[in-house]
Amino acid sequence: MVKVNLKKGKKSSLEIAKTIGVGLLFSGLVSCGSSVEYETSEVLDPTQGIVTTVKEMEANRFRITDEEVVATVADSRIIAQYMDGEIDTFTLQEAQLVDAEDGGRRRSMRGVLMGGMMGYMMGKSMSTPISQGAYANTDAYNKSATKNNTLKSSATKRTVKTPKKGFGSSKSSRSYGG
């Protein structure tokens, strides 16, 4: 005896309900994602590098004494002059690892480096100006401010798209009631 499945080709009501449910869920996710508002901005990426000289003025308190623009970002260096007469030279990659070190002399340099042009090599936005407080004196600051214009004029420009942040920047489907 041969059995014939007469329901072949027909979907059960449970399968139809699952398909509709998944479709509604997917369309809800798509519509929620489209409510995010974006803003575009121009970002400058340095193409030249910096050699920064810092001097320890007091124990673990450094200030920038000189900055020179060099041909490539890979040529960037930090020259540290310590109060005890020691001089340390390290690369940009080593400077970026300063946060990973526990204590030590280099760690106290990070804030000063971020305040100068070296900060641009370490991730600071090139739209942020250099900080006069990072420099040993007004002459060092003024010299770097002039060179900063050269560094920015040679930078490559790209446009980035980021989600808007802050209150009221996107639509929300959540509500709070008591």
Image (cartoon, helix red, strand yellow):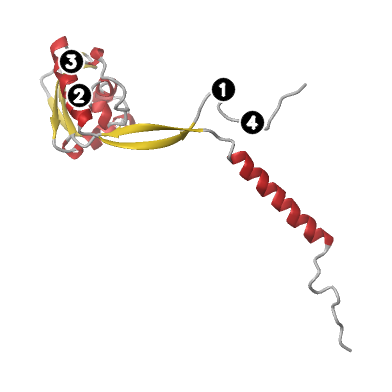
The residue carrying pointer 2 sits among few (fewer than 14), some (14 to 19) or many (20 or more) residues within 10 Å by Cα, namely many
Could you tell which of marks 2 and 4 lies nearer the N-terminus?
Answer: 2
Image: 164 above or below 141: below
The residue carrying pointer 3 sits among few (fewer than 14), some (14 to 19) or many (20 or more) residues within 10 Å by Cα, namely many
Q: Which residue is mark 2?
A: 148
Q: Are marks 3 and 4 in contact (CB under 8 Å)?
A: no
Q: Which mark is residue 73?
A: none
Estimate the spatial distance between the alpha carbons at disc 1 and disc 4, rounded to whole Å: 11 Å
Image: 154 above or below 16: above
Q: Which mark is residue 141?
A: 3
Nearer-the-camera pick, 19 or 97: 19
Q: Which residue is mark 1?
A: 167
Could you tell which of marks 3 and 2 lies nearer the N-terminus?
Answer: 3
Nearer-the-camera pick, 173 or 86: 173
Which amino acid type is shown beneath numbered disc 4? Ser
* Residue 106 position within the rendered picture, expressed as x and y whole percent measured from the top left: 24, 26
Q: Which residue is mark 4?
A: 172
